[in-house]
Amino acid sequence: MRVIFMGTPDFAVPVLTEILGQGHEVCAVYTRAPKPAGRGMEMKLSPVHQLAERFGIPVHTPKNFRDEAEVAQFASYEADVAVVVAYGIILPKTILDLPHEGCLNLHGSLLPRWRGAAPIQRAIMAGDHESGVMVMRMDEGLDTGPIAMAERVTITPEMNAAELHDRLSPIGADLMVRALAALSRGSLNFVPQSELGVVYAHKIEKAEARINWNQPAQDVYNHLRGLSPFPGAFFEVDLGRGPERIKVLRARLAKGSGKAGSVLDEALTIACDEGAIQVLEVQRAGKGPMLAADFLRGTKISPQTQLL
């Protein structure tokens, strides 16, 4: 099939790779514009942009599709279908209606639960035991279109957002190429989403990353897993030079009780409103990830220390 691919982050890369591997003609790629990154603030291409360039595929990075010239450019490709994976730009009806077979979206949740921007993180933060990927036909709503295919994945108790992301991405790639094969045969069927159980996965805000120790340990633990490794849940502690931000990348539920946010022992077990967690891996500002045991060798955090 003649495909326009629309995607931006690492999650979308295996999907584009599989589509190319199956022999579909990817006539154009749409992705978010390069952004400054790193200490030198050099302009960095998105992962999808980098892959498209390696295959010599034309790449477009519009801010939106309000410009008639952008719509005309999109229409000129005369695509059979557009495949959309974590693109990051809302598509207007003028774009949705242009491909002959419409626009297919790969979404990282079991819709209608977790419609929106951050379904993987939100599922873990909420303590869900199951997630998945779905192929749907896009309409003007936010992830409201009819579903064609789905695959389910168990969220294990220790799984963090990065691990669920890496589990879902290749499964989603396989699901999408199977959907395209069925579409090319005229046998891809769609079922409307249920209006029951709708939950929105709102974008992760910076303020959410601060750990709230005044919650039960299980909720704190889920929060840490859902934000690991990015943006990373954090606490602050005074290590002698004023409050310093410490990200918690890995932890486990632990026994113990005390004032919420207080350090209970020399192994960095922290009291929550109910129960406790033990911090296993951290990251200081400007540093790489390190085991909590290594962090504690060079940093004294005594029992009874109150974390902020």
Image: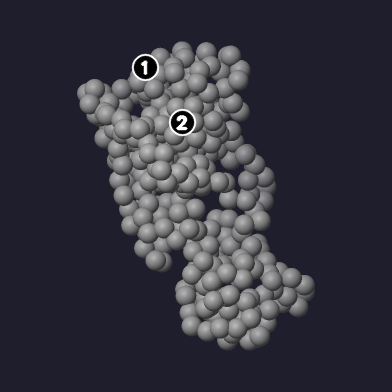
Name the residue located 36 percent from the left edge and 48 percent from the top edge. Answer: 132
Secondary structure type for disc 2: strand
Q: Which numbered marker is on residue 229?
A: none
Cβ atoms at labels 1 and 2 below 8 Å apart: no
Check disc 2 and report the residue beneath it: 6
Q: Which numbered marker is on residue 100?
A: 1
Tell me the quarter of the picture where residue 192 sits.
top left
Tell me the quarter of the picture where residue 106 sits.
top left
The mark nearer the N terminus, 1 or 2, is 2
Residue 75, image x and y in percent? 47, 14
Name the residue located 30 percent from the left edge and 45 percent from the top edge. Answer: 151
Three-letter amino acid code at the position of disc 2: Met
Q: Nearer the viewer, residue 90 or 82?
A: 90
Q: Residues within 10 Å of mark 2 (few under 14, many from 20)?
A: many
Secondary structure type for disc 1: loop
Tell me the quarter of the picture where residue 130 sits.
bottom left
Residue 233, image x and y in percent? 58, 62
Name the residue located 58 percent from the left edge and 79 percent from the top edge. Answer: 271
Three-letter amino acid code at the position of disc 1: His
Q: Nearer the viewer, residue 80 or 154?
A: 154
Q: Is residue 247 left or right of residue 23?
A: right
From the viewer's perspective, is the residue at label 1 or at label 2 nearer?
1
Query: Is 37 rendered above or below residue 272?
Result: above
Query: Is 294 rendered above or below residue 303?
Result: above
Q: Residues within 10 Å of mark 1 (few under 14, many from 20)?
A: few
Name the residue located 58 percent from the left edge and 14 percent from the top edge. Answer: 69
Residue 55 in sight here: no
Residue 120 in sight here: yes
Residue 199, image x and y in percent? 48, 46
